[in-house]
Amino acid sequence: MMSPACIGVLASGGGKATPLFCPNFVDLSLRAGQGAATFTRASTGTVFDANWALKSMSTNVHRLQGGIWSGSAWSAPGVTSTSKLGVTWFDQNGFGLLLEPTRTNYIYASTQDQGGNNPQNVNLETFANIGTGIDGGACLRLGKPQGWGWYSARWSGVNGVFPAGTPAAAQAIYKIIAGDNPHFSYMQVLGGASSSQFYHDPYSKTCHVTGDASIDADVTELGTTGFIRATECHIPSGEDYAYLEHLIDGGATHWTFNSGGTGATTIDSAHVQVEAGHGVSTPIVTGISAVTRASEALRWPATGNVNGASGVLIVELELPFLKDTSLLSSGAMGLVSLTGSAASLCYYDFAAQAFKATDGSNSASIAAVPARGKRFRVAVRWDVATNQLQIGCKNITDPGAWSWGTVTSFAGSFAGSDGYITLGVGIPESILIANAMILGSVQSTVAIQGDFS
Amino acid sequence: MICDAILNMPDDTSFGALPAAVQATIRQMRGEWPAGMMPGTRVVSGRRLTHVLIDIDTADPLATIESAITAHQLDWQVLAMQGIDASGHLAILRPVPVTILDYLEDTLTVTAPPDPLASPPTPPVIATSRPTQVAGLHLYEGHPPWAIAP
């Protein structure tokens, strides 16, 4: 049973929360100047609709997991959630607001409806833009080879754009149209230090990296449309994802998508994407150049909410960890930015399993190792007893007390009309906000309305 | 106005190492940019291009950002700038000059295909050449293409 998630405010002094953001209350700027949140994204973005068709969302229009997008506005989802993010590590049956960092798709002509020189068929016969892609436009169809062989289409545009050691992620969305024995549809990185690949096995619905069939990537079946979203990631310190390491550090130049091989197959290749950062993000459709989606943030004015007198911001979020261990050395994950007479950042330290401030001051630790897709509650409050700003956190399922730490750089200094509380600044990967509210009074323990379940 | 700007700056510029006052100005303009240099470009004589998004609510955003650069004594130049005004029209504040060609990456041409089934697989043979036309400039999702100076 799903319950609506809300981002809301409480009037000063407490009381029942007035939903500010919720699938049922979708205007984020209803009460500007009164503690209302403002959502920003200085570019368009994409979301899957109820039929798993990829839709473009205008600048500064937020994206929901769940809810119904009419093409111009969100409306109440009712019992069945409809809009989808298509990423397995998010709760596909839950509600939430997506916040993503700046991400760039470095692959040109990602849906191949642009014509031109990419991709180039380098083996056997021709290909054609006769499939219908996830964005409704034409996509590349790689036909079924006659006998043993394969089709290979190639996208370019990844030439030394990532500094050495940069985390990276890749995804492909494609549909198997027909195949006698379609177990050899794969993507491959060519050029650079060497070639390597990962491939999708439609029988087991897993992805594998060449040479190590035990390494699975994520495979998401996009509803009943037949499209499959296969994803992989590379972490510099990891050893499991060598193919992308070649792509990043070896100067790889091309990304290929193959059909056929030992099992002759016809497939529609709807979208390919390679981006820098931890984990894949939502699809970024490209044409003749790399394309960047701007970062997303949710911002409240601090005045009247969290200030030198009182206030606590509580956020319930889902962190889409790709691998429990692979991100432990990745450093900081920004989450809450506080700006005003001073500035700092509340971030999640994967190694310490704690929320910290960027000045290295006291941290608030959570008890357990964060599992993939772990849900947390994090809070920022002004403690009138010590006259200091504090951050707190707990596991969403933990009935115990909050763990609090002091942000020392903000001692007695956070106030002023230019102050803002911003969610999403500095995050390296996508997060899902299920619930957020600002309480107008200081509370050592906080109750939160709604959750993921 | 949300503006796209291509800034020319020293390659060793680190935004995190900029003076606090500069970082504050960038924050006020809600500046953001892809990590590293502008995708599809290269370093030339120790300088690189950065494609930034900024939000400036002034009558002349180009003058505003150039004034800020001067005030902070930064060795940056605004190579190109455009944005969408309040009425939804594209405002070309400074078109992309042809001199950006120097910064564009080499054009890659496959002269021999790869062989994925060889043991080991062989990569494609790729020839490089310098671009002769300004095309394929990096974009933010949904933003209009860059205006190119004649």
Image: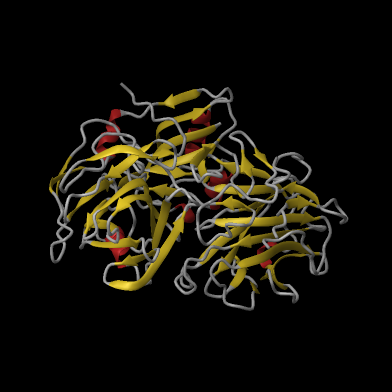
Compare residues A194 and A439 and report the one nearer the observer: A194
Give the quarter of the figure containing the C terminus of chain A.
bottom right
Q: Is residue A205 above or below residue A24?
A: below
User: In this image, A182 relative to B80: left or right?
Assistant: left
Q: How many marks?
A: 0
Query: Residue drawn 29% across and 58% down?
Result: A182
Q: Position of residue A15 (x, y in %)?
A: 88, 55
Residue at the front extreme, as displayed = A180
Q: Is residue A272 above or below residue A137?
A: below
Q: Position of residue A273 (x, y in %)?
A: 37, 50
User: In this image, A79 relative to A439: left or right?
Assistant: left
Compare residues A380 and A397 and report the one nearer the observer: A397
Query: Residue drawn 21% across and 43% down?
Result: A120
Give the quarter of the figure containing the N terminus of chain A.
bottom right
Q: Position of residue A434 (x, y in %)?
A: 66, 56
Compare residues B59 and A427 and report the one nearer the observer: A427
Q: Position of residue A345 (x, y in %)?
A: 61, 59
